């Protein structure tokens, strides 16, 4: 298991408020690592990368289509996208090299998912990733 995958498992899934997580390489627009059982299709990678390429206001208005679900965008800025669909959601944090993706489901606290994902994103940015 890679160092990055260990980071995902320990810092995100370890909270018990992140269902699945992945790191997407921004430059290559490809999946780098993911938690076991979490597959991110190329179309989902494009959606997330394009979410940051657009004007944040446009992303907030349009929302995201991720993992075959429409998500209402509740935050979009230069470094973060938060979107929800009923009791599930996706949190995406941009670093220099990656998009850090975390999902939560019913029964999990979105605020814990957001905090853990943002902290890992900040750590990766400080490390130059």
Image (cartoon, rainbow, N blue to C red):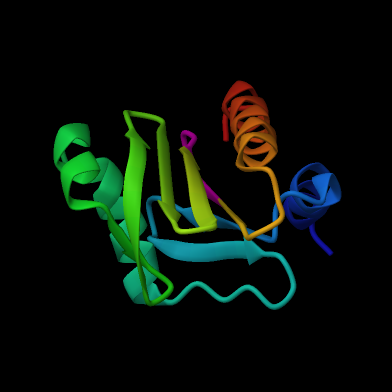
Q: Position of residue 62 (x, y in %)?
A: 18, 51
Name the residue rendered at 43%, 52% in the picture.
84
Instruction: Indicate left or right for 73 with 14 as reference.
Output: left
Up-down relation of residue 110 to residue 88 (above or below): above
Q: Which residues are magenta?
A: 94-101
Q: Position of residue 34 (x, y in %)?
A: 65, 65
Classify residue 80 by image quadrant: top left
Q: Position of residue 44 (x, y in %)?
A: 37, 68
Which residue is at the front of the view, 90 or 124? 90
Say whether residue 2 is visible. Answer: yes
Name the residue rendered at 75%, 57% in the picture.
5
Which residue is at the front of the view, 70 or 48? 70
Which residue is at the front of the view, 112 or 33? 112
Q: Quadrant of the C terminus?
A: top right
Instruction: Indicate left or right for 11 with 101 as reference.
Output: right
Up-down relation of residue 2 to residue 82 (above or below): below
Name the residue rendered at 17%, 33% in the picture.
57
| Magenta-drawn stretch contains 114 | no
């Amino acid at each position: 298991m890679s160092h990055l995958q260990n980071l995902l498992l320990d810092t995100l899934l370890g909270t018990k408020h992140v269902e699945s997580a992945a790191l997407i390489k921004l430059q290559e627009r490809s999946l780098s690592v993911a938690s076991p059982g979490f597959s991110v299709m190329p179309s989902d990678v494009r959606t997330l990368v394009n979410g940051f390429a657009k004007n944040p206001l446009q992303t907030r208005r349009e929302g995201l289509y991720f993992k075959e679900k429409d998500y209402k965008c509740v935050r979009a800025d230069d470094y973060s996208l938060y979107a929800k669909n009923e009791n599930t959601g996706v949190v995406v944090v941009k670093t220099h090299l990656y998009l850090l993706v975390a999902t939560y489901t019913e029964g999990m606290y979105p605020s814990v998912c957001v905090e853990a994902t943002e902290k890992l994103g900040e750590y990766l940015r400080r490390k130059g990733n």
